[in-house]
Structure formats: C-alpha cells, structure tokens
Amino acid sequence: MSHSRPNEQEEAELALLDDDSLSTPAFDDLESNRKNEDTTNTTNTTIELEYQTPMTVKFMWLGSYFLFSMLLTLYNKLLLGSFKFPWLLTCMHTTFASLGTFVLLKLGRFKLSRLNRREHLTLVAFSVLFTANIAMSNLSLSLVSLAFFQIIRNTVPIFTVLIYRVWFGRSYYMATYLSLCPIIIGAGMTVVGEYHYSALGLFITVFGVILAAVKTVTTNRLMTGSLALPSIELLFRMAPLAAIQSFVLAVIAGELPAFADSMSQRASESSILTIVATVAFLLGNGLLAFFLNVSSFQTNKLAGALTISVCGNLKQAITLAIGIFVFKDFTVDILNGTGIILVIAGCAFFSKAELDSKKNSVVS
C-alpha cells in the first residue's frame, strides 16, 4: 500500500500538533512504533530524525526553548534572588514536571507505551544519570571558581560530538565541526576571570562535563532510538524518580532544616502577605520550569543533542548580554563583547551548516 508523502508545510503542522501532543495508537504504542519501523524504507532509517524535521518546526521549538529558558533566568533574577537550596529546587522542578505530565496523560495528550523490565531499568538508570549530572555540577562549583567551571562547561559540544563518533559511529560535515570553534572559544571569552582550581576540581569538572554530554545524547537516543519514546512520556517516567532522588539528597545535604529556618525567619520578619507571595513565586518558578522541561526534551528530540548543546553556549552569551545591558551587573570589555559576537556568529554558521547537512541527507 502506498502512502502519499505530505509536503513540508503539512509536515510542520503534523510535527507541532501531533508529535507528542495528540495521541494516536500508532504513535503512542511502542509495539506499533517498532512494527512501523520494520516496514519503513531502509533508506529513510539511515537519516537522523533531526534531518527529517522541517526547519520551521525545528526553529519554532528552539525558539520556545530559548523563551522559557530566558524567562526562567529572568524570573529567578527578578523575583527569587539567590535560592541556596539546589536539591530542593531540583526536587520542586521535577515534581512539577511529574504533576504536569500526569495531567497531560489524564487529558489524553499521550498514551503510555508498554515497556519490558529491561526498558524500565533503562529509564531508572537515566533518572540516576539526570540526578548525578546535577550533583557533579554542584560539587564542581564547590571545588573550582565559577569562571573556570564555565570555561570547561563550554566544551560540552565537543564531548557530544566525540560520543556520537566513538559510540554510534556518526560523523558530521566539516562545516559543522568548524562552526563549533567560534562558539566554544567565544563562550570562553565571555567568562574570562580569575581561574582557581585544584587537580581534583579539574577532574570533577571534566567528569561533570562528560556526564552532561552523555545525559544530552542519552535523552535524544531514548526518544529517537529503538525505544522511541515521545518526549512527554520520557519526562513523565523520569521526573518522579528524579524528584525522589533529589529529595533524598536534599535531606542528606541538610537543606530541609536550613530551608525551614529560612522560612521561619522570613515569617517572623515579614507579613503574611509576603509569605504568601514567596510561596506563589516558588510555585510560579516550578510551573515555568515544567514548560522549560517540555520544550527542552522536545527540542532535543527534533533538533538533536549537538544542537541543544550549542544552545547552552548561546544561552550563556545572551544571558551575559542581558546582564550587561539590562541589569547593569557589570561593564563589558573588548574581550567579553568579542566573545558574544563570536558565539552569535558561530551559531549562525552552525545553523547554516546543519541546514546544508539536511539538504545533503535528503538528496542522498
């Protein structure tokens, strides 16, 4: 039986409105997915999903990811200030992700796939990887200076490429490799400062960067590989496990009594209205984080792990620019300004290279 192929505009509409948003048995049932994969033309299976996705869809999801990411950054900057309980914050974010995806499940926006024991264990391991990535970041920041941490963190795209090359045997076009140079160098120039680190701190930071790259690639493969889970379902299955793990680590780190003391002190020094406003701000933070998680997972699926890693460097440059021109946190020098320009130019070069890669993949 032959099926007519939708044009690019129709593909864009289907990807935005149907992929992971509207549920149909053929897309939500894992066994149906596998049957469809078996009957798909073998030529199409060699093309990565990120090169099959229309560019309009890809840019719309990238735009939503940046929007929610920057909104959350500004929200924290303007309303919450310094929240010194990272594990409780992670627990709150993943709890909101659990509740939000549960509501979507009840509304029929997606259906659960039938997984075997090994696949369930894979998702448990993924939740541990998610939590471990946060733990390594927190540990790194306690051992090295912030500037040094960000410099090393900017190399995530390099490790992402290496993982794809070594583990999956995948290579990119030369233009894609070249575009990473100004992105990484420029991002490093934006955070030039005093670099303090020890041998242990360097090891922990590099290991944390590798974990971040592994997490990003693993997230993508769970949605585009043999398991082929919808992004909302992956978030639904991972978030409760990560919330529990984060809560346990918050207890171990002593954040619960410290948070209780902080709230008690605030209650004694402020009015009831201020306390209610604080709780509302925290809930708003969790809700915004839920939208960010949804867009992040879907963007990773449709745009690819390398693209989402590059977005991290671009976000750093844009955040710095906002800090300079909006909040006046610090003055920009030639090195910082050049770094911002390099990152933006590199991302434009990267986008052009990926667009050409898609065209070449479709032609071949």
Image: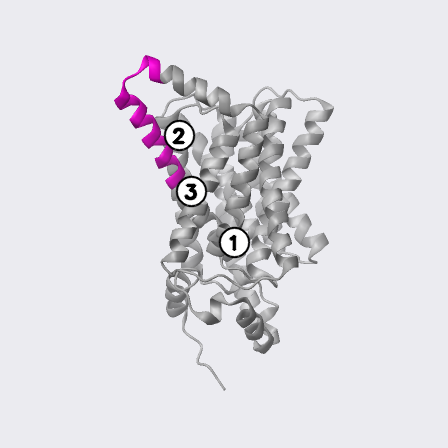
Residue closer to the observer: 106 or 158? 106
Which residue is found at the position 60% from the left and 35% from the top? 153
Query: The C terminus is located in which quarter?
Result: bottom right
Q: Is residue 314 above or below residue 264?
A: below
Provide the residue designation for mark 1: 234
Task: Decide if residue 19 is on the left or right side of residue 158.
Answer: left
Question: For this rendering, which residue is in front, 42 or 352?
Answer: 42
Amino acid tagged 1: Leu
Secondary structure at numbered mark 2: helix
- CB of mark 2 within 8 Å of CB of mark 1? no
Few, some or many C-alpha atoms within 10 Å of disc 3 (few <14, some 14-19, many ≥20)?
A: many
Spot occupied by residue 48 in the image (x, y as percentages of width and height): 57, 63
Q: Residue at x 55, y 23 (%)?
A: 254
**Does residue 285 belong to the magenta stretch?**
yes
User: Which region of the structure is painted magenta?
Assistant: 267-287
Task: Report the number of numbered marks.
Answer: 3
Which one is earlier in the sequence, the residue at label 3 or at label 2?
2
Residue at x 43%, y 18% (from the top left corner): 262
Query: Mark 3 highlights which residue?
Result: 96
Provide the secondary structure element on which disc 3 rests.
helix
Pick the front one: 169 or 250: 250
Whole-percent x, y for residue 17 in the image: 37, 62
Residue 37 can be seen, yes or no? yes
Q: What residue type is labelled 2?
A: Asn
Residue 2, x across and y down, in percent: 48, 85
Nearest to N terminus: mark 1 or mark 3: 3
User: For the residue marked with disc 3, what is the amino acid?
Assistant: Phe
Question: CB under 8 Å between callouts 3 and 2?
Answer: no
Task: Kindly identify which residue carries mark 2.
Answer: 76
